[in-house]
Image (cartoon, helix red, strand yellow):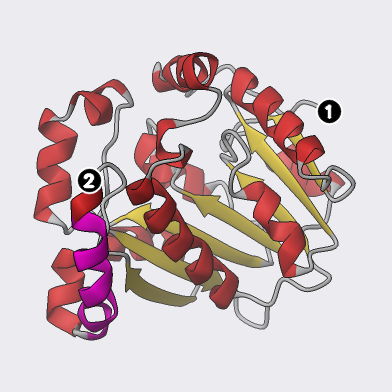
Amino acid sequence: MTYQAAESIKQNVRQFDRDVLAGGSYLYTAERLSAQTANARLSRSVAEAFDFRGKRVLDVGCGDGAYTVEFPALGVRSVLGIDPAAVAVEAAAVRSQLMKVDGIARFSVGNIYALNELLAAEDFDCIVIRGVLHHLPNAERAIAALAGYKGTLIIVEPNGNNPVLKLLERYSSYHVEHEEQSFAPRLIRCWLKAAGFTQVQTKMVNLVPFFCPDWMVRPLELIERLVERLPVIRAFSCGQSVIVAKKPNA
């Protein structure tokens, strides 16, 4: 089934499709040490944020499925990954078959702005939105569209308070081509509360940039846990925020 809407799809959707056609996957899920290390830290954070055992999960903006296929190992009953990039969705389906999790993980072309039909048709315990909002033309509207959702929402986003990240978004050709615009965690929390998610918790994680040289990875890993524990420093140094949001009595 396809859940798609023509409106509000940015040029970067075509760029992501080109990435998959050129390399078989997204650049930030490729087999390079920095990407592997950063992704592993984020995956651990997601796994710690919610008890996924026996749950039905919607992975919004699943891309090439690299993260979606991790959910079966967490004990989910089922996971549906959706993304507007059709070529990426095809690659995700192939990935799930190769990993022999296609009985649990399935994929469809879909749009975060057009979830009403899908949410009415299927009952999801948790929606995960990992690395998506900073690619959208209107991230606030995407969150507002989830006002009727009653389950748990997990958002993983680049830390818009990080000054290095803001420079990369302005001057890095990759970030410019993929139209990235990160947001301060407090702004995302405001959007969530406006949508009725009054129980909102934020955790700042990850010190290893996705595209940094290999020689930088291990030294940054050594101090990562310390930095994540220091309130003021982590607010500006950590690369990602993990936000868990719930409705009252959810």
Q: Name the element at disc 1.
A: loop
Q: Is residue 136 visible?
A: yes
Where's residue 84, x and y in %? 59, 26
As for residue 219 lying within the magenta part, the answer is yes
Task: Work out whether residue 96 or residue 150 is closer to the camera in this orientation and state it.
Answer: 96
Q: Please tell me whether residue 197 is drawn above or below residue 25 in the rendered image.
A: below
* Residue matched to label 2: 212
Q: What is the quadrant of the C terminus in the image?
A: bottom right
Tell which tag, 1 or 2, sits nearer the viewer. 2
Instruction: Name the quadrant containing residue 168.
Output: top left
Residue at the spot x=11%, y=50% of the render? 164
Give me the disc on residue 1. 1
Q: Is residue 240 above or below residue 221?
A: above
Count of numbered marks: 2
Q: Please provide percent x and percent y for residue 202.
A: 38, 74
Residue 125 shows in this picture = no
Q: Position of residue 195 (x, y in %)?
A: 50, 60
Residue 66 vs residue 102: left or right?
left
Q: Residue at x 22, y 45 (%)?
A: 212
Mark 1–mark 2 Cα distance, whole angstroms, equals: 38 Å
Q: Nearer the viewer, residue 196 or 85?
A: 85
From the image, give the main secondary structure of the stretch colored magenta.
helix
- Which range of residues does the magenta coloring cover? 216-229
